[in-house]
Amino acid sequence: MKIIPAIDIIDGKCVRLTKGDYATQKIYNENPLEVSKSFEAHGITNLHLVDLDGAKSGQIVNYKILEEISTNTTLKIDFGGGLKTNKDVEIAFECGANQITGGSIAVKNPILFEEWIQRFGNEKIILGADVSNGKIAVSGWQEESSEELIPFIVNYQTKGIQSVICTDISKDGMLEGPSFEIYKTILKEIKNIKLIASGGISTFDELPKLAELGCHGVIIGKAIYENRISLKQLEKFITKS
């Protein structure tokens, strides 16, 4: 199971939100590159980078930070937040993203999202399935769509999607543990999907459980920044697996 730390960017700084609420913003570090290098130094190979300014404004904003991290580390970066046009996606890839994540766009403009899958290749495009009360949430989690979680993923799997990041919004930033039941259901009902668990990770003990369920990866944010899980622990986990 891949360990994927998250860096969320507002005004060029590493922040975390609670349940996606911008009013809960807490700055953890003013230098995202420094944070990325500390991950890399502990054997971490992947990074989930979210442009929260981009998510709010509806276009890519923090691409310079993406470029800085991709140029100065060997981390494989999946990038999301504010990717709404072909130009946004082109900029993300030009600036060093290995993959991009599309959530709102997959609900609001499925034709364009399907075009991206065809044009850039399904290994480059991750489906973002952010869920609230069983429905897919969009627009920086400000709106709930009518799309139901399982059919939404199944539909995009038929279009070629291989990887899905599923975040239970009610858990995000709460440090109360992930949604094991949701992930269990997805993996039971949808075969051959690379499921990346996200939201609520609070202790190291949750990681082997997610691996046991069959999760392909796990995104960890606040638990690292609040020192609930140390980079040393993650290094050991990576070495063992």
Image: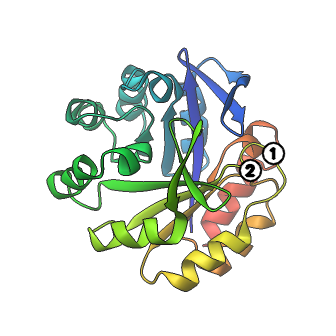
Among all residues in the image, which is located at the extreme top?
A: 11
Element type where label 2 sits in the image: loop
Query: Considering depth in this image, is 101 or 76 the residue closer to the camera?
Result: 101
Please name the residue shown 75% across and 52% down the image. 200
Please name the residue shown 40% across and 50% down the image. 107
Query: Considering depth in this image, is 20 or 76 the residue closer to the camera?
Result: 20
Element type where label 1 sits in the image: loop
Mark 1 highlights which residue? Answer: 174
Image spot of residue 142 (x, y percent): 59, 35
Please name the residue shown 15% across and 52% down the image. 119
Q: Which mark is residue 104?
A: none
Q: Does residue 47 appear left or right of residue 203 in this picture?
A: left
Distance in Å between CA atoms under marks 1 and 2: 8 Å
Image spot of residue 36 (x, y percent): 54, 35
Colour approach in the figure? rainbow
Tag 2: amino acid: Ser
Q: Determine contact: label 1, label 2, CB under 8 Å.
A: yes
